[in-house]
Structures are given as C-alpha cells and as structure tokens.
Amino acid sequence: MDDDELMGRITSNRPAIAPRTGPLLGALEDVVRGSRPPQRRKRFLVTGITLSLVLVGGTSAAFASPSLLSWLGFVPDKTVQHVTADGDVCAAGIIIHPEGVPADDASFLAARTLLMDIDFDTLQIPDDIRTDTNYAEREAAKTQSFSDWNAAHPEATMQPAAADLRTDMLFDTTYRLLTDGVTAQDLDASHFSLEGAGTCDAVAP
C-alpha cells in the first residue's frame, strides 16, 4: 500500500474534523516539519484529531485486535499496544516495506525477521532514547502549532493527537534494533522502511 492509499483509508475511518482546506493543509505541513528533524527513513506525521502516522521500518498482524484493524483501515504486520500512566489505551499498527528493492531482497527479509521476533511487551527502551528531551520538545512544538492554528481559525479548530511518547520511543528503538541487526549480518540497512498509524484512547485494547 502506498502513502496515498494509506491516507485515503485513514481519512475514511477517522472522526469528522474540519475540512482540509488549503490553509489547513499548510498548517498541517508546518506541524509535520516541526515534529521531527528530516530523516530519510523515519518521520512522524500528525493528521487530524487522534491520528499519528509513523514511517520507520517493518512488522505482523497476528496480534492486531479487530477494533484496531477497523480503526486503522489497513492490516498491519505487527501492533504495539500499551496503557499510559493516565489510563489512556495507546495502539499502533506497523507495516514493513522493501525500500527500492524486491520483496525477496536478503536485507529486507533479514529486517522483517528481526522485527517479527520483537516482543513489544518486554522491549527495553535504551537510556539515551528514554531520556532524550527532544521527544517532549517536539510534542510541545506540535501542541503549540495546533494552538496557533486554532487561535487564527476559530471556525475550524483542531485538537492534536494525544501524546504517546512511549510508542514513539518504541518505534525508534525498533528501528535501531533492525538497522543494527541487519548491519551486523553485513547487509544493507537502507533496504527497508517501517510505516504505521496509531492513536490513544480511540480503540479498545
């Protein structure tokens, strides 16, 4: 599934929000650009009230609940679910893609195997990722971008997705594990990417 198809499916499943006019789309692009530094195979998007999109690297649908599948609008390779300290249920679905190579590419297959072996319930977030203040700073910048938009457009206000720094950190940890694992096998870590979507408190665990 390409980005346009993913966005189309998500748009048809998310809650009703303000029309995506030219100015609104421009504001969303500003949020996207400010949410993370540009990276070739890892970026974080915010599109609407409860939705976050992630592009990072690969995954398995065996653990995806029907409610999550219904909300996402696509079948993920793997899912991440947890409950925050505030009691919000956060869930995300992930798909792994070959990046500029055929699906039987050795590097892509190695990355997919590594991903499928990850247990997100026990995956430990490295200290340098867990203590990285950039996650909170990007979340604050995202919230401020929405506040600025709402102040300028009271007729079409939006609310950002609920903060889910743990899932963000788990994605980055996963991407690191996959790239390190593929590289350790003398393979090319640029041959895969992860794509996903997630939300907090919009689906049952």
Image (tube, rainbow, N blue to C red):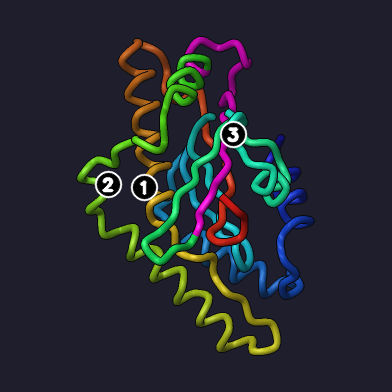
In the rendered image, residue 103 lying in the magenta stretch gets the answer yes
Amino acid identity at mark 1: Met
Which range of residues does the magenta coloring cover? 89-108
Q: Position of residue 114 (x, y in %)?
A: 43, 21
Circle 2 — which element? helix
Image quadrant assignment for residue 19: bottom right
On the image, numbered disc 3 is attached to which residue? Answer: 95
| Residue at (62% x, 55% y) in the render | 203
Q: Does the segment drawn in magenta span residue 63? A: no
Answer whether labels 2 and 1 touch (C-beta < 8 Å).
yes
Disc on res. 100: none
Residue under circle 2? Answer: 129
Distance of mark 1 from mark 3, alpha carbons? 17 Å
> How many other residues sit within 10 Å of disc 2, few (<14), some (14-19) or many (≥20)?
some
Pointer 1: what residue? 169
Nearest the eye: 17 or 39: 17
